[in-house]
Image: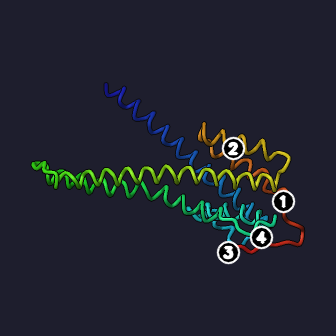
Amino acid sequence: MELILGNIILICMIVAFVLSLYSIAQYLLRGIAVYKLAQSRNMNNAWFAWVPFARIWLFGCISDDIRLKKGIKKSFNAKTLLLTSIIIYSIPVLVMIVAICFIVTSFINVDSYSAVQISPLIVGALILFGFILLEFAACIVFKIFYFICHYDIYKDYAPKQSTLFITITIIADLIFDLQALSSVFLLAISNNKPATLNDDLSTNLN
């Protein structure tokens, strides 16, 4: 029995180690790709590619810059990606805090079942449901703009392969959760000459 338990623990540790390596590799690959794309557009804040949340802002800024060069004066990809990503990561923390508060409240009032004392639990449940809906909506909006930004970059750096790249990116991300594949595409095209930039054109995006 101890041998079986030991083997299970060993397997779990190996799986956790492999997943950790994959996560690190994916983070580095994405960082290199976004960094090189930002550098190709002469952005002063290319180092944001290595900072959590800031890297998604930078990714949106690259798309916004492409649209600006195409004559689209108002583009909010960077702001939308940053806002929705903050919501996505902060909601679970808020849910945990609210859940703990109302669980503690339920234990304190465990011997009482009056409507006045039960109502806070109902309010808590409604709050949690609202948070879940907000999280779901933020995830949808984030994914939409996330794919839009990818397509903008693909279209600018590899116009002939843009449709193929965005199709594979969407399928790999939504069905197989392979976000690293899009990073490979971005890195592969980062050395290409973007259609929206001339040799003497530089961008300083703060």
Q: Amino acid at mark 3?
A: Asn
Residue beneath the point at 73% across and 64% down: 38
Q: Amino acid at mark 1?
A: Pro
Residue beneath the point at 89% across and 72% down: 200
Q: Quadrant of residue 153?
A: bottom right
Query: Which residue is identified by label 4?
Result: 42
Query: Which residue is identified by label 3?
Result: 206
Element type at mark 4: loop
Could you tell whether 85 is left or right of 38 in the image?
left
In the picture, the quarter occupied by the N terminus is top left
Q: Are marks 1 and 4 in contact (CB under 8 Å)?
A: no
Q: Residues within 10 Å of mark 2 (few under 14, many from 20)?
A: many
Could you tell whether 181 is left or right of 164 in the image?
left
Which one is earlier in the sequence, the residue at label 1 or at label 4?
4
Q: Position of residue 111 (x, y in %)?
A: 9, 48
Q: Amino acid at mark 4?
A: Asn
Q: Which mark is residue 194?
A: 1
Q: CA distance from mark 1 to mark 4?
A: 12 Å
Q: Are marks 1 and 3 in contact (CB under 8 Å)?
A: no
Query: Which residue is identified by label 2?
Result: 169
